[in-house]
Amino acid sequence: MSAAARAAISRLRSRAGRSLLAAAGIVAAAAMLGTAITVSYAFGTGFERSAERADLPDVIARFEEEQLSDVDRRVSALPNLASRSYRLEAKGIDLAAAGGASERGAVHIVRAGRRGYAVTEGRDLSGRSGEVLVERGVAAEWGVEPGEEISVEGLGPQRVVGISVSPDNVAFPLSSDPRIYLAHEGLVESYGPYGAPVNMALVWANDPARIDVTLEQARAVSYGLEDLRFLTQGGIRGLIDQAAGIVIALLVAFSLVALGSAALMLAAAARAEVERRMSTVGVLRALGFSRAGVVGDYALEATLLAAPAGLLGLGLGALAALGPTTGVLESLNQMSPGVPLVGLLALALVGIVAVVAGATAWPAWRAASRPPAQAMRGPVVGSGRSAPRRSLLPGGALGLGMRLVAARRARLAGTVAVLGAATGLVLLMLSLASVLERLQSDPGVIGKRYQLTANGPASLAPAIREIRGVAAAAPRYEVEAADSFELGEAMRLIAFPGDHTVFEAQPLAEGRRVRGDAEAEVGVGLADTLGLRPGSVLPAQLPSGAEVRFRVVGIVRALENEGRVAYVRPRRLAGATSGADRTIAIRLEPGASRAAVTDALDDLGALPEPAVGGATTNNARFLGTLADMLRAVAAVNGLMCLYALVQALALTALERRPAIAVLRAGGAGRRHLALVFGGAAALVVALAGALGLVLERLLLGPAVTELAADYAALPLRAGAGSVAAVIAGLAAVALVSSAWVGRRVAREPVVAGLRAE
Amino acid sequence: MSVVRARGLVKAFGGGRAARRVLDGADLDVELGEVVAVLGRSGSGKSTLLHVVGGLDRVEGGQIEVAGVRVDRQGERGLTRFRRRHVGFVFQFFHLVPELTGEENVLLPGRLHGDSSAAERRGRELIDWLGLSEVANRLPQTLSGGEQQRFALARALVGDPTVLLADEPTGNLDAESGALVLGLLRDVADSGRAVLLVTHDPEAAAVADRLVHLEDGRLVPGAPEPLHAAAAR
């Protein structure tokens, strides 16, 4: 170790308390950074990482059972084909293990060739009879491990040889079908040849970027394959997004904003530390040290402090986020981030050290540029005003505290910026939590703008519209149709007379809304399956056998029926609407009484149906895991707020030691000091709260809403309760920090403060 | 009767071979209406004496009684209460809060303790008495040293203390301002308070009723040798 490093360590030790406080700040900011990086990287790259590890095919085709030879003849002729394999998927199979059972088991019988899944524990199927591979979600939920047995309907007990993961669907129990794999060869060994039906083809392309060419040809040669559905990697990701994409996108955005706050705070803390020791800079310069020498010493000290503190903070942040993050990833059948995350965290450590060293070196350089006599007097405080102005701040202890903290405007601005950004983030997080709840129950989140439905003839709609509290009412038709290009693709036609966006307004991904009877908006799922774009023709075979055609004018991000829907006007459905599933959609006025409207519907003879539901996921464990993650991020954020405020107050106390000592000499006790620092804290948190609210309302909320618009209609806006909770939290942070600093200051001898001049 | 009575005060700084007793059996008495000036060379322990009498620091031995309060037996809360009720301090560097006007500095103790109306009335009377009305709304950095020290004196007196402790009150002032401040301290004593003054300033002798000097940790009556001549003048 060099002499300079030894000297720097010795200096850090000599003021152990302050060094630890500074290190604590770096730990807090680094923890935030660690959390942000872990969450961003884990989710941002989760699907691609897992798809690569699992060797996920570029296209998965599903169809009614066909002989392998017939299917392979068509698939092998496809252009851009790298390799292929086939499976038979049997659904609704009874599965039972020691820790759980289901009647909705999905058994995939796999054949030789590329598997399309990764084995995370144990080994892959060998082809011998009696072996089974269990999906990770099932193994976790039922407590199944390799070597144990699982009972499969019709086959009896099978020995689990491994645990697998494939990100082509969300994991059980988020997906309601537990999935296991059996080897075709093993079944033949046990039961003899059972024919060779398959209903899934897995296709790997030479050039995944040109998969559309392969798909186009596949459609052309698919004549005779019933109920054919293609799922590309992009499509799979879309499906996953339906389950958790909204939350993931919001968390990634949240983490990026948190990262900015952490950097700001690191710089503020480092700057504060140099200002704290301004007089030492003056002494060093007076003793003949060069500016570069002084700056080098400070930068070295900062590095020696930042490196271990940053490492600890990053580790703590990553560990805090990793547990809940892994939980969510497992729910999505995705892999943990692994080694690349360590590399990113190492880069972040370098960044932290650079920020701290740089933020220390710059003010040290400025301090070293001052005349030594001036630097020895310490940081310059005071209003700098030559003439007094009537202060808007109150008198007394609180007002004095406010004036003391306001005297350093740049630091006040920095502290307010850090706390304000953190407050905005917390508000955003609370909005997010409320969105998680609404995803389950609020139809508005998925674009449905009506709250009630009723059964009755369409002719009742005008009478329903007259009911007090009803904003709009119209018949809603649902027709289950099939694509009449002989692919047999199932779809749902949803029809409203007039503008359907009054009742259902799914986010528009492309094109425009329906304006006429011959037009249709189709869901992304249907568009992907049939290769539809605005301008395409959608031919639909109605249950009556009649065919109607619509011109596609828009693509919407609909979650209903996996996006395999089309919004049309009812006129072209003609007679089909008489046999359609018809209800009357009822949109209520804001604040209208649902019960009163329901009673009025009863009086009219319309039969009210259960309240309109929300989106997809009703899985408590999944939502619980997400809530854990939000709490972990919030906890780190809260600690950071507390530290930033304590740092600002402690620095104010240090700079104003003489003034505070005079107050104490005049009989100010611990309570008065707490009031002084309470005033200082109150000013900071009041400004930060206002800034946070403005940020959340005008910047963060709209930005994240825009981000989430791909998934659902999410007007992110913290409610009054959330705002009140954040204000209470800020008040608590102010109380704790002012009490702590007041107590700390009161422990110092009064005369020490008087000598500080 | 002495309002300040100290016996056998002991106070040391440092440890081991560097330990030094700045007070080593010091005795002191100050009566109401009296100005006592403590003289002595730099580092002799004059300020320390003032601090222990005013309850800003603790002694390691001896007894201090001020206005009937045994200062050496008080806990931190008791000392805080004692300072609030019985003592006013004036410092060499004024220690005015730079963000507050002169008047706000004077009224600060009263506002801090919540007894603002009476303290405000008294504070304004003091400002008038000290001739500071014209500059009451100015910030400290725009005031002269003498004006700043007078505001500091008003702040020390606003709580109506029994004892005024002044630590080098003229050390940062020109001769004219220093003389003015010393005169005011005399007036304060004449109004019935006890004034304990620590100073290097030989002019202080002119306003003091008694001079004592610190020598080897003990208080000795009279001025130290080099000051005798000046004091005699």
Image (tube, rainbow, N blue to C red):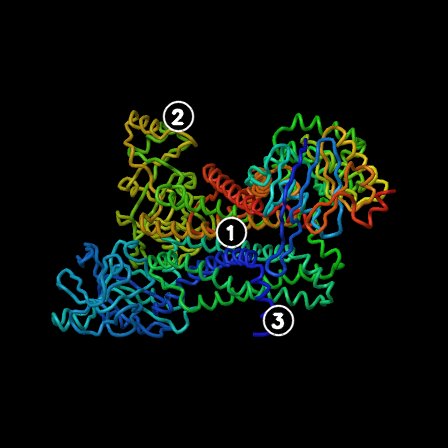
Three-letter amino acid code at the position of disc 2: Arg
Q: Position of residue A138 (x, y in %)?
A: 25, 59
| SS type, badge 1 | helix
Q: Quadrant of residue A398?
A: top right
Towards the viewer: B18 or A295: B18
Identify the residue shown where x is 83% and y is 46%.
B228
Q: Which mark is residue A618?
A: none
Q: Is residue A595 above or below residue A217?
A: above
Three-letter amino acid code at the position of disc 1: Met
Q: Is residue A201 above or below residue B25?
A: below
Q: Earlier in the sequence, mark 2 or mark 3?
A: 3
| SS type, badge 3 | helix
Q: CA distance from mark 2 to mark 3?
A: 81 Å
Q: Earlier in the sequence, mark 3 or mark 1?
A: 3
Of circles 2 and 3, the one toward us is 3
Quadrant containing the N terminus of chain A in the rendered view: bottom right
Q: Earlier in the sequence, mark 2 or mark 1?
A: 2
Instruction: Give the residue number, with chain letter if any, for mark 1.
Output: A640
Towards the viewer: A380 or A509: A380
Q: Position of residue A503 (x, y in %)?
A: 40, 39
Q: Is residue A193 above or below residue A62?
A: below
Instruction: Give the residue number, with chain letter if any, for mark 2.
Output: A468
Towards the viewer: A482 or A332: A332
Q: Which mark is residue A4?
A: 3
